[in-house]
């Protein structure tokens, strides 16, 4: 028997399932931190784990084995800890924690990844070896399989279905295979014979369980810890983009790559407004770095209060009405709203633009709005947040506000000239200051290509007012063949590739493109993230699901202030869980289930081919001999009969004479093979010319013998 990495057949039989399980758990654990390096480290671990298993076997036989193992464990822990300390000395005390909790961040950090790979790998290998080779304990093995789930949960990530299924199948394989073998490979009362029937039986059982797991759609309930992953984030320094939706992040969501949505309700909203759709804001961003949106304002922790009142839609309407002689109450209205959920406790208040946070004493403020990104905080106590059950008022711009801006028909330069024409008029001064603040903070030209700028100018060439330009840019995407997709992954992550080539993506891509295009033609614009509220329940309340997270654009329009624009094409309002009862929904779910189980089907096909290998070979032989002379047919049939007999008794019969084979077949199972064997002797040794009337009964006898040989012998007596 050839050795694989110095493993005998017996050792391989004992080691194979625990080793494969250790490799799968190791790979899944590293996969969440950095996908490319996970493949490299796992390849090295696969070799190292075999060596460690053999080493552990030898240590068990030594009196000093426990001491040597303790020393090895100490070295592994020391090296891993040293790598972490070196990283902390270079990047700061909290850098390993940021790396560990950095949701959505797949950047490669060599020293920390190596520390996890070395120390974690040695520990994992030790535990799995102990609970399968020394003390067989199913619970101990199962706890090892929980490691990758722990890592994915801490980073608010979802483990791919294929990894979950693979770990589950290998765990079942360990439970079935190694339990029969017993601890340390010693034979138990029920002796295990690892033959073809055993392999097929175990494979079929595992495949059935795996197929059901992959195909059957599992109900999902979003737990409190998942909704509020702030509880996973020490010191509030997680960074990245949390899938928990309860915290604000330092940068925007990725523009590509499918988000992990389960479409379970996140929270609910009700309002006096008759609007069919509300855009509930979480945070606005001012600077695009080429990949993400961030905030660059220096006054990031300045809050609106009585001493620093917010100049919002109502103030713009009042001052513009004072300058034009209009009636401000026709342009906006104050609406009441409530957002609530029993388990959701966000640090921010999901609310429309224009929430009223001023006009009251500073010590009685319920909500605090950040000046830098206009985010609204529910309280200043980050760690003592009540469940979401908040009532507030907000200023809703009516349709008349848009008509008012259309009638004035201001371009940017005309609006500035109009305001400056009033001299020191207080209303004009406030409007001018607000507009100049918007221009200063939200007209940056970073990462806007000349090609994108040219397209934006072409789209707005026939537009006069800023409002016309914003509307033209908003409708460009729906009028030029763009499509919505959560699954599409582009070859290029640039904005230009999205606008000019792929024309496919989800809301973050559309909002980013429009914001940059608006800025390129001189419009103050900001990228905003939040939720789109459009689904209503039987009580008329908005149901906001995690899949309704949305990105949109706010443009400062002369005479109106900040107005919301949504360039995302149709598609984002669909809930894939809502159409399950329709024929199309059932079909799509079935196709999705088949796609999830595709890997299982491939393995099942391999097992089927393995189990039918002898039958397929026999069919191939019977087909091939049809094109051979009768003499060749007899020789081929005899050789195959000899091979089948040898496989049945588990021995190599190549040295058997025809008489020995005849005797073996008769005494073992009463098989008579005289006609074929006699015809073979005449043909092979006597040069006999076979006639068809002799060949036909010999062939029938061969088929009868083969059917009986394909079954197990009751005894294997030798002649």
Image: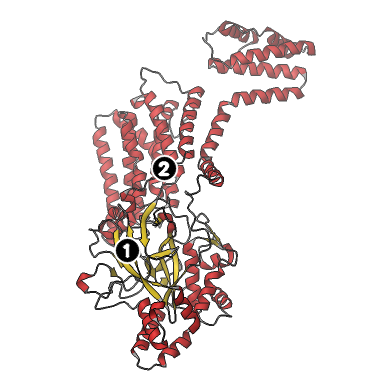
124, above or below 440, in the image = above
Give the mark nearer the N terminus: 2 vs 1: 2
Q: Position of residue 452 (x, y in %)?
A: 54, 73
Q: Residue at x 51, y 40 (%)?
A: 597
**Residue of label 1:** 349
Left or right side of 618 for 389: left
Left or right side of 494 for 629: right
Q: Position of residue 553 (x, y in %)?
A: 45, 70
Mark 2 and mark 1 residues within 8 Å of each other at the beta carbon: no
Q: Position of residue 554 (x, y in %)?
A: 43, 72
For label 1, the crowd category at 10 Å Cα-Cα, with few meaning under 14, some 14 to 19 and many 20 or more, is many
Could you give the CA–CA distance between mark 2 and mark 1, rounded to whole angstroms?
29 Å
**Residue of label 2:** 219
293, above or below 32, in the image = below
Left or right side of 517 for 267: left
For label 2, the crowd category at 10 Å Cα-Cα, with few meaning under 14, some 14 to 19 and many 20 or more, is few
675, above or below 395, in the image = above
The quadrant the C terminus occupies is top right
Give the SS element for disc 1: loop
Q: Which residue sits furthest left?
A: 363
| Residue 165 sits in quarter | top left
Q: Nearer the viewer, residue 670 or 684?
A: 670
| Residue 57 visible | no
358, above or below 179, in the image = below
| Residue 420 visible | yes
| Residue 372 sits in quarter | bottom left
């Amino acid at each position: 028997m050839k050795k694989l990495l110095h493993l005998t057949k017996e050792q391989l039989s004992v080691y194979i399932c625990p080793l494969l399980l250790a490799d799968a758990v190791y790979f899944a654990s590293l996969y969440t931190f950095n996908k490319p390096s996970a493949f490299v480290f796992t390849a090295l671990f696969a070799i190292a784990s075999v060596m460690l298993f053999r080493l552990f076997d030898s240590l068990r036989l030594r009196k000093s084995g426990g001491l040597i193992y303790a020393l090895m464990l100490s070295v592994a822990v020391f090296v891993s800890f040293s790598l972490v300390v070196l990283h902390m000395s270079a990047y700061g005390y909290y850098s390993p924690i940021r790396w560990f909790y950095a949701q959505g961040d797949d950047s490669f950090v060599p020293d920390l990844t190596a520390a996890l790979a070395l120390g974690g790998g040695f520990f994992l290998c030790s535990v799995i070896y102990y609970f399968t080779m020394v003390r067989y304990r199913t619970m101990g093995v199962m706890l090892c399989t929980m490691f990758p789930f722990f890592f994915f949960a801490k980073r608010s990530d979802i483990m791919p279905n294929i990894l979950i299924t693979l770990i589950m199948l290998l765990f079942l394989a360990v439970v079935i295979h190694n339990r029969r073998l017993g601890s340390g490979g010693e034979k138990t009362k029920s002796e295990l014979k690892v033959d073809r029937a055993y392999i097929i039986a175990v494979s079929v059982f595992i495949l059935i369980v795996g197929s059901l797991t992959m195909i059957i759609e599992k109900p999902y309930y979003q737990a409190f810890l998942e909704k509020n992953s702030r509880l996973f984030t020490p010191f509030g320094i997680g960074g990245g983009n949390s899938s928990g939706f309860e915290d604000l992040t330092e940068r925007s969501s990725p523009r590509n790559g499918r988000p992990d949505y389960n479409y379970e309700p996140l929270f609910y909203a009700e309002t006096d407004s008759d609007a069919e759709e509300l855009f509930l804001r979480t945070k606005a961003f001012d600077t695009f770095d080429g990949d993400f949106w961030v905030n660059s304002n220096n006054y990031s922790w300045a809050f609106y209060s009585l001493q620093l009142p917010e100049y919002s839609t109502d103030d713009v309407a009042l001052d513009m009405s004072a300058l034009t002689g209009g009636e401000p109450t026709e342009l906006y209205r104050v609406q009441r709203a409530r957002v609530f959920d029993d388990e959701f406790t966000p640090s921010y208040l999901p609310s429309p633009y224009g929430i009223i946070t001023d006009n009251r004493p500073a010590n009685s403020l319920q909500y605090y709005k950040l000046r830098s990104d206009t985010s609204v905080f529910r309280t200043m106590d980050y760690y003592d947040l009540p469940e979401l059950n908040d009532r507030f008022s907000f200023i809703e711009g009516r349709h008349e506000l848009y008509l008012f801006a259309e009638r004035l028909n201001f371009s940017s330069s005309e609006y500035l000239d109009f305001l400056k024409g009033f001299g020191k008029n207080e209303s004009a001064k406030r409007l001018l200051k607000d507009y100049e603040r918007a221009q200063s903070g939200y007209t940056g030209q970073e990462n806007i290509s000349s090609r994108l700028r040219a397209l934006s100018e072409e789209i707005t060439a026939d537009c006069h007012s800023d409002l016309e330009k914003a509307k033209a840019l908003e409708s460009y995407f729906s009028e030029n063949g763009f499509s919505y997709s959560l699954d599409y992954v582009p070859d290029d992550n640039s904005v230009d590739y999205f606008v000019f080539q792929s024309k496919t993506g989800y809301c973050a891509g559309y909002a980013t493109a429009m914001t940059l295009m608006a800025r390129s033609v001189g419009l103050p614009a900001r990228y905003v993230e939040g939720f789109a509220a459009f689904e209503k329940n039987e009580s008329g309340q908005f149901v906001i699901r995690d899949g309704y997270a949305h990105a949109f654009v706010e443009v400062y329009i002369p005479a109106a202030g900040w107005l919301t624009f949504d360039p995302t094409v149709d598609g984002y309002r669909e809930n894939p869980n809502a159409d399950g009862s329709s024929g199309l929904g059932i079909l799509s779910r079935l196709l999705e289930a088949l796609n999830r189980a595709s890997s299982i089907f491939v393995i099942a096909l391999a097992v089927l081919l393995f189990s039918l290998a002898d039958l397929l070979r026999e069919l191939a032989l019977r087909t091939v001999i049809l094109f051979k002379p009768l003499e060749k047919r007899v020789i081929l049939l005899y050789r195959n009969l000899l091979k089948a007999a040898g496989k049945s008794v588990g021995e190599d019969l190549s040295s058997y004479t025809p008489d020995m084979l005849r005797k073996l077949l008769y005494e073992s199972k009463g098989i008579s093979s005289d006609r074929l064997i006699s015809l073979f002797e005449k043909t092979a040794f006597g040069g006999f010319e076979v006639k068809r009337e002799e060949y036909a009964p010999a062939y029938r006898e061969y088929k009868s013998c083969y059917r009986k040989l394909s079954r197990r012998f009751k005894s294997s007596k030798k002649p």
